[in-house]
Amino acid sequence: MSNEIAILGAGMHPWGKWGHNFVQYGVAAAREALADAGVPWQDVKFISGGATMRCGYPGYVAGASIAQALGWQGAEVNTSYAACASGSQALAAARNKILAGECEVALVVGADTTPKGFLAPAGGYRPEDPDWVRFYLGITNPTYFALYARRRMDLYGDTLEDFAAVKVKNSLIGSKNPRARYRKCFTAEDVAASAMVADPLRLMDICATSDGGAALIVSSMEYARKIGKGNAPRVAAISTVTPTFASEVVEMPDIATDSAAAMGVEAHAYRASLPVKAYEEAGIGPEDVSLAEVYDLSTALELDWIEDLQLAPRGEAAALLRAGDTALGGKIPVNVSGGLACFGEAVPAQALAQVCELTWQLRGQAGDRQVEGAKVGITANQGLFGHGSSVIVTR
Amino acid sequence: MSSSDNKPYAAAIEGWHTMGAKPALIGTQCDECGSYFFPKQTQYCKNPQCESTDFTEVELSRRGHIWSYTNAGYKPPTPFVADDPFEPFAIAAVQLEKEQMVVLGQVVKGVGVDDLKVGLPVELVLEPLHETDEDIKLTWKWQPSEC
């Protein structure tokens, strides 16, 4: 298809919590991706970075900061910010540049250094900022995850054991991923024994924040063929659509939903809207998907995403999980990287890390985590203010 | 109104709710399409089919039903001001029928997640959020109701 670009290289700095400068992680990831692609740094004519908001000014211009660290060589730079979807938007910027014929090869990179504990808003007295308001009232990120989890229990009969089973599944497979931060195989008993953060979610149901860096080398299909990589995995779709008014789901960081009192407005939540556009753009359907990397900010959210990606009918993701269908070797493996459960969230790097995993899987290079015969992978992630993304990679 | 130690009460966020015995959240309603907004929207209507810039301030329904609920088991970061020692509190997302919207808020002290369920009727009350040197800051909270 004409709007495809090739993924020539993927690289990641392992996830962890060291507090080093984010640029260091970005450079390590970029160098690994360049080596993986076999492309000289001088050939990269566009550097597209995902911004980080917690590392001062260099983070706001992350594309330039990392390009400078790799050595200025006259390429154009871009920096995108869309919370956890930053990496996908940076990838979309690179794709646009390539498809417009303005460059052949681009580096897409995201890296972050995160503080301990809850992510907190900027200070002051700022009631005009919904992110400030909700923290002032004591409403944190896990509050929202827990509200959705409780809805699943109430509407579909999901249980605490189901949520724990997601953690057990992801930690088992993630233990085989050398880039994951948490590599211990947790049991359902471990989850049940962890502290209650936001009922019904315990500490082990909720993802941590991590340091990390991820990078991709992408190119035009023509360039890929020219260097003998015409059969490289391809980006077949990038979706970053918003929800539509008036969605009934209260989304982080809002304190209230829109009102659906006006007539004639058909609402769509963005989680379900994202893959619809992605499937359409890629010209495929959920039945074609070999594996999915979804944003398990909480264990219960992995189940929501499975349904949003139409990999199971609404309310039936837990049945899929219980049957072992979302584990490695199952019908539709989900989060074979180990997911956020094993990585923790490194905001501007995370959407790219998902694409790195799909790249390795589609090349058959995922080792102990390999999904047999993987041909099509899909990602899904969410940020703040309706930001989210879904990327489809095919081979 | 004043507290036992004679500090006056004040709204934690000025103008977001009435201060009387039967308090209500103060929102706005679009004069053109009828959409409600909380917090107040006064500049532009967020309905994509409506270009109105005219709004009327309205008190939102004081009663609704729980859409979902949870609690805060860990002390939230600032700007939240925590009691010392920190006491976990419940949080509810409440569906307002007339406005067709969901509003979050803490649940009154003494009511935990075990006392709540999806669909439970609740009403809006005011309770202290935290204290300053000058006054006691009140905010809206949800309280299980009879009807």
Image (spheres, coloured by chain):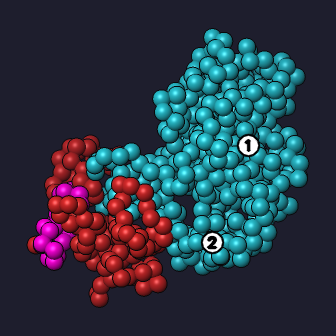
Chain colours: A cyan, B red
Judging depth in this view, the residue of A160 and A284 nearest the camera is A160
Name the kind of residue labelled 1 in the image: Pro
Q: Is residue A380 in view?
A: no
Residue A159: image quadrant is bottom right
User: Could you classify mark 1 by the number of other residues whose Cα lies within 10 Å: few (under 14), some (14-19), or many (20 or more)?
Assistant: many
Report x, y in % for residue A335.
73, 55
Which quadrant holds the C terminus of chain B?
bottom left
In the image, the segment drawn in magenta is: B2-28
Quick check: A22 left or right of B121?
right
Q: Which residue is mark 2?
A: A194
Report x, y in % for residue B42.
21, 47
Check disc 1 and report its element: helix, strand or loop: strand
Judging depth in this view, the residue of A298 and A326 nearest the camera is A298
Asked if the stretch drawn in magenta spans residue B7, the answer is yes
Q: Which residue is mark 1?
A: A14
Q: CA distance from mark 1 to mark 2?
A: 25 Å
Q: Would you place residue A57 above or below residue A18 in this image?
A: above
Q: Residue at x 87, y 42 (%)?
A: A365
Judging depth in this view, the residue of B126 and B99 nearest the camera is B126
User: Could you classify mark 2 by the number of other residues whose Cα lies within 10 Å: few (under 14), some (14-19), or many (20 or more)?
Assistant: few
Residue B34: image quadrant is bottom left
Q: Is residue A133 in view?
A: yes
Name the kind of residue labelled 2 in the image: Ser
Q: Would you place residue A73 above or below residue A334 in this image?
A: above
- Point out the tag, 1 or 2, that comes first from the N-terminus: 1
